[in-house]
Amino acid sequence: MTFRIKTLNAISPLGLERFPSAGYEVGTEIDDPNALLLRSANLHDVEIPASVLAVARAGAGTNNIPIADYSAKGIPVFNTPGANANAVKELTLAGILLAARNIIDGASFAHRLDGDSDSMNEAVEKGKKQFVGFELPGRTLAVIGLGAIGVEVANSATALGMKVMGYDPSVTVENAWKLSSLVERVTNVEQLFRRADIVTLHVPLIAETKGLVGAKQLALMKPTAVLINFSRAPIVDEAALVEALDAGKLRGYVCDFPSPALNKRPKVVTLPHLGASTAEAEDNCAVMAVDELRNYLENGVIRNSVNFPNIDLPRNPQTARLAIANSNVPNMVGQISALLAEAGLNIADLLNRSKGELAYTLVDVEGAIPSELLTEIQSIPGVLSARILS
């Protein structure tokens, strides 16, 4: 079988090269694609082709993809957590320094200077006092979200001599192991806002995080505190933020998302969405996304899906494999096993995993699986998609 991959954005050649020439067609003009590979393309209100088996975003955030629509069709949506973590970490640290040392305003002041050397030196000495900042050692940084990026930011900040607090009620065991022992884990988010000199956000944009930082949270912060947002713009209530800045209740705001309300505003630094804009990050994300797609299309294995559970069952070349996405309902595996038994097929191996309301099952079967049996499995109530991998 030849898999057809449609790219919806420019994808790093380093990633695309991982698709073998035999067995894959890759391009922007692919009809009836088996998979979609994208970065920022907006899939909301775009009809899902019936041929699509998987979607992969070369990046972490997936708010440009209607996850529920793809879930309902049994289509896993992959992302690339951690692939751009170093790039975003570096920019976050730069953002902290921009705010702490008033670098943007200072550079703008220097850029506007005219005259000879003597007059410039005189203007510099008179003007530099308005850009006095603060140093980082001993200051308290609050990191909200301890995923791949948040952990790297927290660990790097400790190396800079900062006191670091971390907040993430759903931190994974893997990320917890990576977190420096110097990071104080805080469970009371209000305490975190009260104590921090700098708050940095590293959470995905989902319904629960939209407006995560609003008037209530901003009111808890010190008037000398700085808010850093390199996650997504709607995580901060912009109207409440502007009000806090205008009232002198916040020292500054640094973000990656320009807007009419923020641009050219005092105490605000906006950058043009540079978080993952490095050649290295684009390469890493593309490579990871392509590997995820290939493993799913060829083996039915799921890694880093935002809607379906991770599942990995080693392939046995002597068996055929069924890959089944379904609603997480009782007796699903029993019904599938019963149909296989009725067809006289022996199960060599089976693995089932669930994630919320969705589940996914891999079944390795001795012997060929007839298409009629696949049709029967697809007709089980709750089965969202099913395919045979020979």
Image (tube, helix red, strand yellow):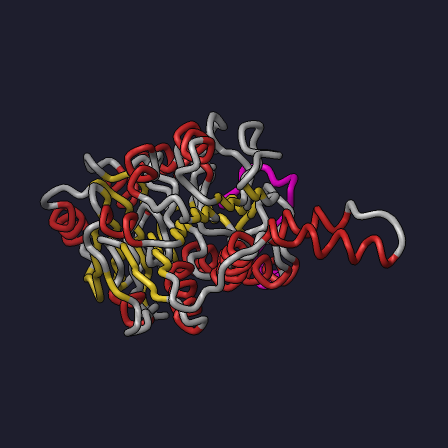
Query: Residue furthest toward the top?
Result: 45
**Residue at position x 29%, y 45% from top?**
374
Q: Is residue 108 left or right of residue 215?
A: right
Magenta segment, prevailing SS (helix, strand or loop): loop
Which of 84/233 is in front?
Answer: 233
In reply to whether residue 156 is colored magenta, the answer given is no
Query: Looking at the image, can residue 88 be seen?
Result: no
Query: Which residue is situated farthest in the right direction here?
Result: 116
Residue 109's spot in the image, x, y percent? 71, 47
Residue 21 magenta-highlighted: yes
- Nearer to the camera, 191 or 234: 191
Relative image position of residue 8 (x, y in whole percent): 59, 41
Q: Nearer the viewer, residue 353 or 279?
A: 279
Q: Is residue 67 visible?
A: yes
The span picked out in magenta is 18-35
Q: Position of residue 24 (x, y in %)?
A: 58, 54
